[in-house]
Amino acid sequence: MLFGVVLEPAISLMNKLTFKAKIILSISLLFTLLLLPSHNIIVNYWNQQSLLDNQLNSLELSEKVEATEHQMMIIKAQKELKKQLFLFVLGFIIIVFVSLYLISAFYYSLVESLKKLEVASNEIASGKTKIHLQSDVNDEIGNALYAFNTMSQELTKNLSFLDGYKMAIDETSIVSKTDKRGVITYVNQLFCDVSGYSKEELMGRPHSIIRHPDMPKEAFHDMWKSIQNKKVWKGVVKNRKKNGDYYIVDATILPILDSEDNIIEYVAVRHDITEFEKSKEELAKHKVDFLTGLPNKSRLLDDLTSTAKPILLYLNIDDFMKLNDFYGSRVGDKVLIHMAELLDTIAKDLGCQAYRIYNDEFLLLCEDGGSANLSNYKEVLKEIINDIEESTIDCDAPSCISFTVSGGISSYLLDSDSENLALYASNACYMAKLQHKKLLIYSHEMRNEEDYAKNIAWIKKIKRAIIHNNFVPYFQPIIDNTTGRVVKYEALVRMLDDGGRVISPFFFLEIAKRAKLYSKITRVVLDKTLEKFKTHPEYECSINLSTEDIVDKETRSYIYQKLEHYPHPDKIVFEITESEEITDFNIVNDFIKKVRTFGVQISIDDFGTGYANFEYILNLDVDYIKIDGSLIKNIDTDEESRIITEAIIAFSKKLGTKTIVEYVHNREVYHEVVALGADYSQGYYIGKPQASI
């Protein structure tokens, strides 16, 4: 206790010195002791003492008075010499004591700081991070304590971030931990909420407690093989709830390694995608027009095959394109939705089914009761048209929009092939417009010379354009939504008329297909596009192919030949139009496998229209899914379109397939598709088709 009290001021003094000064002071004191001329002092002392002793002995033999006086002087000198020796020894002892005193103070000062670090380190190891060490020194030890405080603050901050991330994951994800055997050691509350089990029921149990019998054992074998090899495993798993129900999760399992790279546990993070999977199943089952909610053309064709005596009532909005251009697509879509709602109500009253088959084209499928009296249906359709034209809709225009409708009727009496009935009803409507009538019943006499003359005129134009090399590709940019940079272009066919005007494929493409001229156009576009991009290897180029192109043996051979001599085949993407039903997947898959040997990529075009279903994608090995513009154009205001698009994007990510969205025509739509996770964007907001890159 006394030693500590005595030592305290020395420690305080040492704390005021730098570490370097303490070392120098201690060493200096030691060297002072070592280098002190103690040897010379002691030797001189003994020499002088011997000399004085000899002199004293000599004087003792003399009896002179002077000798006695001299003897007294020698004795006095001896006493002085002994006094000096005493003082030297005393000083030496004091110096040794002070040196030991200061060295002890330095030692205790150092030990005290190290003890603080030791205690603080143990506290960190036990999980406590908010530690502040008080430092009274300004030397290197003080700097070390300051650095430790800084480290503690940063560690606390980082752990706070980690706690925030953990909380975010716990609140939004199903989380569990297991030991190396798969026994549960931790579950969060969401795990319990979704599975129906309590934490007590789950802790210490294997994960097989939630295994659903529908899950094959092979899936879990692959999972264990991956994570035991220290790899992250991802997959979709169907689990069983406590009540016997099921839920589906998108799971990611990570092996946690120690400092020696050994597995110590596994962490699983899951997201409940049950509703998404159910909606995906519903989308696969039901072929629905996404804008209006009515069944689409694909559903109509299915229903026609199961209808014994079908009668079709076809309706088409007059000059809808002009209406859409004048008021804008949003108002145009409101017109279509309003039309669909009216027809759906009318159809239910009549015992029929309403369909939207394309753009502004609608159909009512009815089954005749046996009379086959089409005049009755003519009156019904006339009444429907009158009701529609008298109706108005809410709109953004100053006054609500009125529109007119034309119609056509066809029946099972015309053709045993029910798939032709929709075409017949459409032709009847077309003839009604030409004759300025509201509706007509189709008859084979309607295949008039005017209709044929129109088609023949277009066929001549198409042939002339092929001969004069007037089919050209236009290129529309596609941007990477992550970087905002143009990384691809899609080649779009255009026809130049005799005056050099650019004609949209809307006017000639279907006629070219019916006239068996489409493959020639495909080859011209392929040649010119490859020639254009030969000097632009920095961009990928998408070229559209129909299933007719792929099925045609000569066109396939021509494509293979072009790829063999093209320097950058890995920059080519073939877009297969998804709106056309593929009847022979073997031919298409063989084509895909063949072009892949050259490095070509594959995209499904117009996904979400026509024969769109998820099973279709699973049958083809594709790199991209291009989501049709009918889903995208109003995605910023149409919640249903947004939900379906989100489902398609999520589905694509599960397959490892990239998504491209079309019809990105304004800033709002662009921000929406980026937020939904689409990989690429294309549309007039990005850039219009141009003849040059």
Image (cartoon, rainbow, N blue to C red):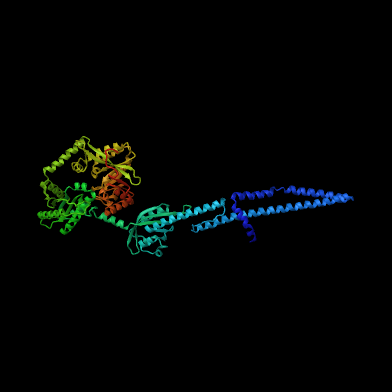
Between 334 and 13, the one lying in front of the other is 13
Depth check: give the residue in front, 397 or 232. Answer: 397
Residue 2: x and y in percent read 65, 61
Residue 304 is at least partly visible in this image: yes
Q: Is residue 688 left or right of residue 438?
A: right
Specify whether 91 is left or right of 552.
Answer: right
| Residue at the spot 47% in from the left edge and 52% down from the top edge | 261
Residue 591 at x, y percent in the picture: 28, 44
Query: Please, which residue is most extreme toward the top here?
Result: 468
Q: How many marks?
A: 0
In the shown orientation, is residue 603 left or right of residue 148?
left
Image height of 231 relative to 531, above or below: below
Question: Which of these two is toward me, 134 or 256?
Answer: 134
Q: Quadrant of the C terminus?
A: top left
Q: Position of residue 280 (x, y in %)?
A: 29, 55
Is residue 107 something that shows in the picture? no
Quadrant placement of the N terminus: bottom right
